[in-house]
Image (cartoon, rainbow, N blue to C red):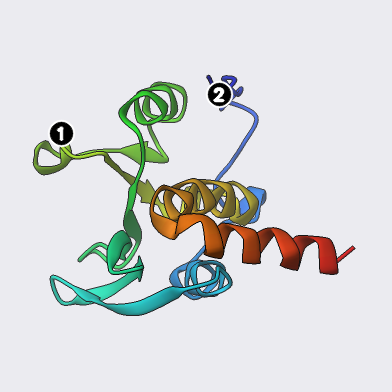
Amino acid sequence: MPARRDTNSRTPKASGATDISTFRKIALSFPGVEEGTSYGTMAWRVRKSFIARVKEDGESIAIRMEFGEREILMEGEPETFFITEHYRDYPMVLIRLSCVHPDELKRIFANAWRMHAGKRLIEELERRGADAR
């Protein structure tokens, strides 16, 4: 279970906020990720499985996430992580990009990617990590 964080010590812009361009770079850095569209906005998939998309507001994304982690994040950082009624029954969370640090977003994307990447792509990512050392 992820640890709770103190959200009072963090202001959106001071934390190294993310934008769509930064998120796009994060998403495309993972093996097998393909960019396309979903509901008319940029979206990312791996092995034809949906991972994330830009919301129509252009300032937030919808990303796959297990319900338990979603609830913890929404409770701990409601200004960053939220859902609308539409997403209530889907294993997804909405993230305000201006409120999330790129490192945290990369961790969240990695978890969503691992749900569908498959063994070969996960091994490729691990090899890349070892090569970077």
Amino acid residing under circle 2: Pro
Amino acid residing under circle 1: Arg
- Determine the residue located farthest toward the left in the rendered image: 86
Residue 39, placed above or below residue 51: below
Please tell me which residue is depicted at 65% across the width and 48% down the height of the picture.
15
Expressed as whole percent of the image width and height from the top left, the position of residue 57 reads 24, 64
Q: Earlier in the sequence, mark 2 or mark 1?
A: 2
The C terminus: image quadrant = bottom right
Direction from residue 54 to residue 119 in the image, left or right: right
Q: Residues within 10 Å of mark 2 (few under 14, many from 20)?
A: few
Residue 17, placed above or below residue 47: above
Expressed as whole percent of the image width and height from the top left, the position of residue 24 reads 47, 73
Mark 1 residue element: loop
Residue 90, placed above or below residue 69: below
Please tell me which residue is depicted at 33% across the width and 57% down the height of the picture.
61
Kindly identify which numbered label has been placed on residue 2: 2
Residues at marks 2 and 1, CA–CA distance in whole angstroms: 21 Å
Kindly identify which numbered label has been placed on residue 88: 1
Expressed as whole percent of the image width and height from the top left, the position of residue 21 reads 49, 76
Direction from residue 58 to residue 8 in the image, left or right: right
Please tell me which residue is depicted at 38% across the width and 48% down the height of the picture.
95
Residue 60, placed above or below residue 28: above
Mark 2 residue element: loop
Judging depth in this view, the residue of 110 and 49 nearest the camera is: 49
